[in-house]
Amino acid sequence: MKKQIIGLSLVALAFAPAAHAQENTAPGGCIVAEQAQQLIATLKQRNDQLRDMSEKMRAMEAEVAAARSATGQIEASRKAIVIAADKNRELRELGDAIIADYEKMGLGKKMAAGEPLTGLYRVRLENKLQELSDQVAALGFYPERDAVPAAEPAPTNP
């Protein structure tokens, strides 16, 4: 009989960890409910952290988009300045050419320009003046026409 009792106690000891585990996982047990509450609290905390990080990320994406837009505007401004400087140089050269032509005009040409009978030289001077006026207009800088518009920023996906 002692052997049977010892055998039963060995069987009981072998199954004791399984029985103890069943007590911990039994529905309505204290430890399982506490663990579930801890898990729920942890998940809520992580969800709040994730929501905060998502909001920060959206704000940073908006800042990046604004920075890209500003960079595009700066590049467009730089290009406009380069174009304006080139046109200004060309206008200066044209102005110098006009002044040189005027300085070459002698007394005879000035009197021919004021000649009232045929006015042929006056017509040539007016044609030349119109040609120079057209060149000045062509060399004028108009930002909306001459400057390259800035590229639109890429749309951001929320």
Image (spheres, helix red, strand yellow):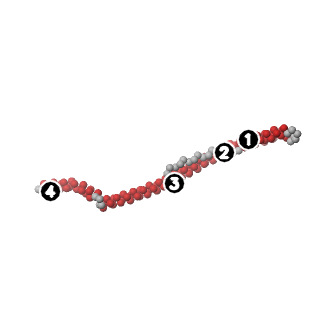
Q: Which residue is mark 4?
A: 5
Give the answer, above or below, for where 41 lies relative to 119: below
Q: Which residue is mark 3?
A: 59
Amino acid type of disc 3?
A: Ala
Amino acid type of disc 1?
A: Gln
Q: CA distance from mark 2 to mark 1?
A: 16 Å
Residue at image coords 36%, 57%: 39
Q: Quadrant of residue 130?
A: top right
Residue 108 visible in the displayed image? no
Look at discs 4 and 1 and give the one toward the viewer: 1
- Measured as percent of width and height from the top left, residue 133 is found at 75, 42
Look at discs 2 and 3 and give the one toward the viewer: 2
Q: Is residue 6 left or right of residue 56?
A: left
- Measured as percent of width and height from the top left, residue 15 is found at 22, 54
Q: Look at the numbered discs 4 and 1 and tell me whether their residues touch, using CB distance below 8 Å.
A: no
SS of the residue under disc 3: helix
Residue at image coords 81%, 38%: 124
Q: Which residue is mark 2?
A: 145
Q: Is residue 134 left or right of residue 121?
A: left
Residue at image coords 88%, 39%: 117
Q: Which residue is mark 1?
A: 135
User: Is the residue marked by circle 2 packed among few (<14), some (14-19), or many (20+) residues within 10 Å?
Assistant: few
